[in-house]
Amino acid sequence: MEGKTNKQGIRWTGGGLTWGKLHIPGMIDPDNEVMQHGLTSPIKYMRLLWRELNGFRRWYAQLVCEGLPYAKPKNYVSEGTVGLDLNVSNVAFVADEQAGLLPFDEGVSTFEREISALQRQMERSKRANNPDNFEPDFTARRGRKTVKKKGKSKTGKRQWKQSNRYRKLARKKRELERRKVAYAKSQNRKLVNEILRHGNHIKTERVSVKGWQKQYGKAIAAKSPGFFQAELVRKAANAGGSVTQFSTQSTALSQTHLTGERIKKSLSERVHHDQTGIVMHRDLFSAYLARYVVQDKLSLQDAVDQYPGMESTLLGAWEHFQSAKRVGVAESPKSEPPAEQIPGNSEKASQISHSGLKAC
């Protein structure tokens, strides 16, 4: 529930909730800068809501204030152009003096493993307490082997018995799901802040997250690239910047070579072998080219001229991505196939062979 103003009905006064003769003091952390910033801002109205944490219902007073939200000093925004390449598992960015390949939500897989274990326990408890609600087990052929499979639940409306252990597991599962969603949002906001620290004018391909859901449903649910897109647009606009999206069909950055040729490659090919001799991570190279897209057209000559000065930055970002320790993802140089590792001649000043370049 919420009030219309902070002058009547349910309102925030004197450091607590006031409703008629009822006054409940709030639990305020004096060292919390975000909370103190909100309390010193003019309050428009207040909401009263509850959240379930660890199986217990907790009540909160949510204040809707005037002005701008609190911004931490480390989350500053710089002027500049940033090329962005977004995919299901990570986001690559290339700014004026910095580049990076940042994975989405590194710790989400840990939550998913714990949730899957709880789901298996809940399923065993459910079958043990409701044997009449399931079809009998049966055997089936899997290749040359015969395996035993559990019967499906019977159709129709049925009574289900839930043990105390089942209810306890269900509460724990709800808590893990809540924490997973909160963690994913927090990590995506960190990625947005990291990108905006290097520039507030973003150029990126117009990708359809809904289209990805058809093929990568579970990954999209865990990584939330759509939320990342929405936060990037919102925060860039608040910082006086912009997010420019261009068509993937007219640019085809992942297929474009610095010679002007377009050669299709499968999604499994994560390394771009350019016709000029350049070897670069596919996403980093697409993010670099995105910086030079103007009105859905790639200015190829500008990309060719500026690449020697950016090559060491891109190689450093690729090397850092490979050597970084990530939860549940084996992408270090030792675990990658040779075709996906940084080439041995990467220490040269430039990999470009300028012979035969074609500018569009």
Image (cartoon, helix red, strand yellow):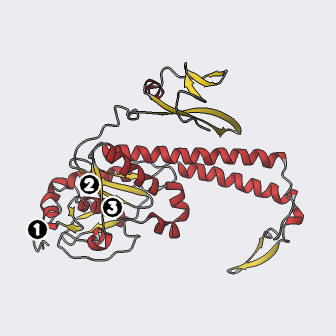
Instruction: Decide: few, some or many residues near mark 1? Use Cα within 10 Å; few <14, some 14-19, many ≥20.
Output: few
Q: Are marks 1 and 3 in contact (CB under 8 Å)?
A: no
Amino acid at circle 1:
His
SS at mark 2? helix
Query: Going 48% across and 27% down the picture, which residue do you hit?
Result: 35
Q: Position of residue 342 (x, y in %)?
A: 30, 59
Instruction: Decide: few, some or many residues near mark 3? Use Cα within 10 Å; few <14, some 14-19, many ≥20.
Output: many
Q: Position of residue 310 (x, y in %)?
A: 19, 54
Query: Going 61% across and 24% down the picture, which residue do you hit?
Result: 18
Name the quadrant containing residue 131.
Answer: bottom right
Q: Nearer the viewer, residue 41 or 29?
A: 41
User: Relative to 60, is 160 above or below?
Assistant: below
Extreme right residue here? 132
Q: Is residue 127 left or right of residue 85?
A: right
Q: Position of residue 82 (x, y in %)?
A: 26, 52
Q: Position of residue 327 (x, y in %)?
A: 50, 49
SS at mark 1? loop
Name the quadrant containing residue 306.
Answer: bottom left
Q: Nearer the viewer, residue 273 or 286?
A: 286
The residue wearing badge 1 is 354
User: Relative to 290, is 98 above or below?
Assistant: above
The residue wearing badge 2 is 315
The residue wearing badge 3 is 283
